[in-house]
Image: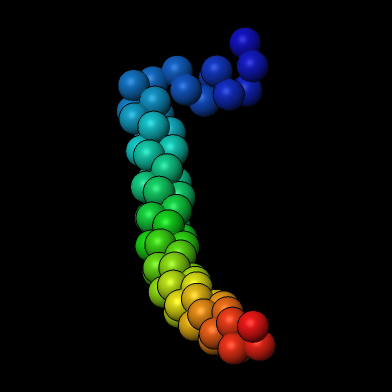
Amino acid sequence: MSVLERKLESPRDNFRMFHCVLKDHDASLSELKAARAGDASALEGLREENAVLKEECRTLRSSLNEQVSSFD
């Protein structure tokens, strides 16, 4: 019998081990949720910046097209 198996012989030990694993899982899940919220916020900021840049490109393209048309 391994050391771990001997340590987990009683139901109380099993419960304690399960409880520790569950607490670790909950902590990891909380960290992942916080990271996901941060990523979502950053992504929203990038989308807004992208929309502004696209509009600037449209404006520049339109301006250039008008200038080129004036040469004809």
Percent position of residue 25, x then y? 42, 43
Q: Measured along the vertical axis of the image, is residue 9 above or below residue 30?
A: above
Residue shown at 44% from the left, 72% from the top: 51
Percent position of residue 13, x then y? 40, 29
Give the colour scheme of this rendering: rainbow
Q: Measured along the vertical axis of the image, is residue 9 above or below residue 18?
A: above
Q: Quadrant of residue 41?
A: bottom left
Percent position of residue 52, x then y? 45, 79
Q: Residue furthest top?
A: 1
Percent position of residue 11, x then y? 34, 21
Quadrant position of the C terminus in the picture: bottom right
Which of 26/3 is in front? Answer: 26
Q: Quadrant of residue 10?
A: top left
| Position of residue 64 in the picture relative to residue 22 (left or right) | right
Which of 59/13 is in front? Answer: 59
Residue shown at 44% from the left, 68% from the top: 47
Residue shown at 39% from the left, 32% from the top: 18
Whether residue 64 can be seen here: no
Whether residue 57 can be seen here: yes
